[in-house]
Amino acid sequence: MTAFVGAGLRRDLLVLLALVVLGCLLPQVLNRGLVFIAGLVWINAVFGLSFNLLFGLSGVLSFGQAMFFAGGAYGAAVLTQSLGLPFLLAWPLAGLVGALLAAAVGGVALRRTEGVYFAILTLSFAELLHLLVINTGFLGRNDGLSGLARPLIELGALRLDFSAGDRFYYFIVFACALLIALVRWVIATPFGRALQAVKQEPERAEFLGIPVRRHRWSVFVFAGFTTAMAGALVAPWAQIVTPELAHWSNSTNPILYTLLGGSAYFWGPVLGAVLLSAVFYVTRTLVGISDLVTGLLLLSVVLALPGGVLGLLARWVRPAPRADRPAAGAQVGAGR
């Protein structure tokens, strides 16, 4: 299996800083509709990175990430609209909802299954949550919760009103950048390196003293937290949350981002989110065709670009070995 590839932490943080600067400049050149899509791209980038933390780094395949995304969105909506909590408090609490949900699901699923059986079990839990949402009155049933206000944030004398125009977009940029930096930092920790070992050789990792099941459960909970934090940003940005957020089809989105961009690369899901959002935007008026285009795109990537777009770019950039240059192993053998 492909090892999770990433540049140095400092370099990735510099790339993130450049993306933040670029993101903050977009409202100056885009109309409001495209700015709204740009905000969703940032959110979906975190959604994809959280999934790839499981799949690309740890080798854990989940088909149920939509339940954590929806849990964060509904959690933020209920906490702010029904309970009247300020968004700065509701946002991390919504992330906690996702973490607790992931802890419960992971505790059951990882104890009993692994591999494709684990993936199917997570899909079952996600559909169970979807059915629960559409049959719960205070969650709006099939209609969801609408009329959600964008927040007014007060920190002492500092008062930030995000209710007008696209001001909340800037909050999304910095909030998602914070989550991306957090994910990248986790990858660079000893825990992240242990997860790579768990993916590559789980039996050997267990033999070396790494508790494989506990590490998988821990990263599943962390991914649930970051996914829910991303989902919580959708509530005030779209000003509506619907049961479709918990539908199984929403769980395919981070998989598409990851495969399209390249699961072996940290920035793969981010690039995938940008490219797939562009495809959705271009085909938005093609009723009944958009899903077909998406399916054909995924099929093309799997068959022609198994390493994703970044994998293709890496092969183009990497210099080909010269035919007249002996391999390193041959040189060593000749010198013996």
Image: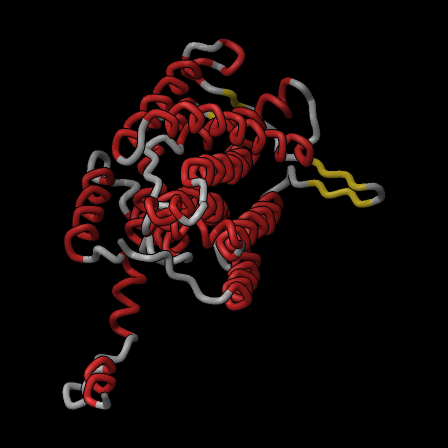
> According to the image, what is the colour scheme of the structure?
secondary structure
Question: Is residue 50 found left or right of 306 in the rendered image?
Answer: right
Q: Nearer the viewer, residue 167 or 11?
A: 11
For the point 39% across and 20% down, which residue is it?
130
Name which residue lies at 43% across and 29% down: 106
**What percent of the width, then of the height, locates residue 311?**
28, 62
Q: Residue furthest right?
A: 157
Question: Could one spot residue 270 in this view of the protein?
Answer: yes
In the figure, residue 92 lies in which quadrant?
Answer: top right
Is residue 260 shown above or below 101?
A: below
- Image side of residue 90 versus residue 267, left or right: right
The residue lying at 70 percent from left, 40 percent from top is 161
Up-down: is 282 above or below 316?
Answer: above
Identify the residue at the far front of this view: 336
The quadrant of the image that shows the C terminus is: bottom left
Q: Is residue 226 left or right of residue 108?
A: right
Q: Quadrant of residue 288?
A: top left
> Would you say residue 22 is visible in this rendering?
no
Look at the picture and state if 238 lies above or below 263: above
